[in-house]
Image: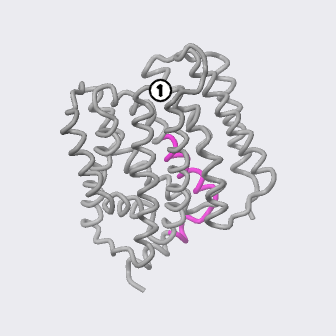
Amino acid sequence: MTSNDSAIASRTAVISTPASGIRWGLTGVVAFSFTVVFTRIAVDGMSPLFVGAGRAVVAAALAAMVLVATRQRLPRGAQWGRLLVVAGGVVIGFPLLTSFALQTAPASHGAVVIALLPAMTAVVVVIRTGERPSRLFWIMAVAGAVAAVGFAAVGGAGATGGFALHGSDALLFAAVVAGAIGYAEGGKLSRELGSWQTISWALVLVAPVMIALTAVSVGVEPPAATAAEWAAFGYLAVVSMFLGFFAWYRGLAIGPMARVSQVQLVQPVLSIVWAALILHEQLTWATVAGGAAVVLCAAVAVRARIR
């Protein structure tokens, strides 16, 4: 066993309580809750391809520097293939699909569909890891997904003039599937490589593809962004694409993953609040009541027994 292996085993032993997994997961969710809003801002001055691919290029550069500075050992064997699954879900799939969708959809409408991500993640976790949540967990996971979608629909009605499905929803649904797969595989792999190491290697692995896509986007439609739009892009690159996964994958690694995934139910609540504060989309008392229902479902789900 190498010293690096010992460090990872020691770290896992220290942070093994479910409560700490929930706290780390919630920290990641707070970081991710700004993603929809800042993506909506960024695509006003940049092409969605540049926003989706360019942020991964910036994050990959940061990841490479950290991996070299800390002298991390290379992943081994099948871990490379699993890292490709992680990268396909959270580095390529989710960012690109949501960037194209939010070019036309309001931020609050995007939260409607992305609210299904916790339930989808729980399903993938059960398939991938063999965790067996209790009946109460599934009842609250489904209730939370329904409440989150209803909450986001009510919250987005003021911005859209009423809730209805749009063509961009197909992209958002695909983003949910991609994100769930990337979350589940990344959480499992983080138990072997470490949380920040997993997202860092995933970013570096597909960096050549993202660099090529970024170059194409600049050639077709050069960015013409304001300072605010560049700032939004910077958050997406540094926090949504990199630092947020430090906490999120650490929480999933501590687990149980199905339970930790349900703290995502509060993400649409936060996203609607940020959309109201930053984008001035309407926030009503009905929205506040719906948000409280979502948080209640999440609180029960994360306390449900996992076999």
Amino acid at pointer 1: Ala
Residue in the picture at 58% in, 31% down: 112
Which of the 4 image quarters holds residue 225?
Answer: top left
Label 1 belongs to which residue? 105
Q: For this view, does 276 lie left or right of residue 296?
A: left
Q: Does the magenta stretch include residue 218?
A: no
- In the displayed structure, would residue 60 be above or below residue 9? above
* Magenta region, residue range: 12-30
Residue in the picture at 67% in, 28% down: 150
Residue found farthest to the right: 135
Query: Percent x, y for residue 166?
Result: 54, 27
Q: Residues within 10 Å of mark 1 (few under 14, many from 20)?
A: many
- In the displayed structure, would residue 42 be above or below residue 286? below
The color scheme shown is: one colour
Query: Percent x, y for residue 267?
Result: 56, 38
Q: In which quarter of the image is the N terminus?
A: bottom left
Query: Percent x, y for residue 69?
Result: 25, 65
Q: For this view, does 122 lie left or right of residue 159?
A: right
Label 1 SS: loop
Foreground pick, 170 / 270: 170
Q: In which quarter of the image is the C terminus?
A: bottom right
- In the displayed structure, would residue 80 be above or below residue 23? below
Foreground pick, 178 / 251: 178
Foreground pick, 299 / 101: 101
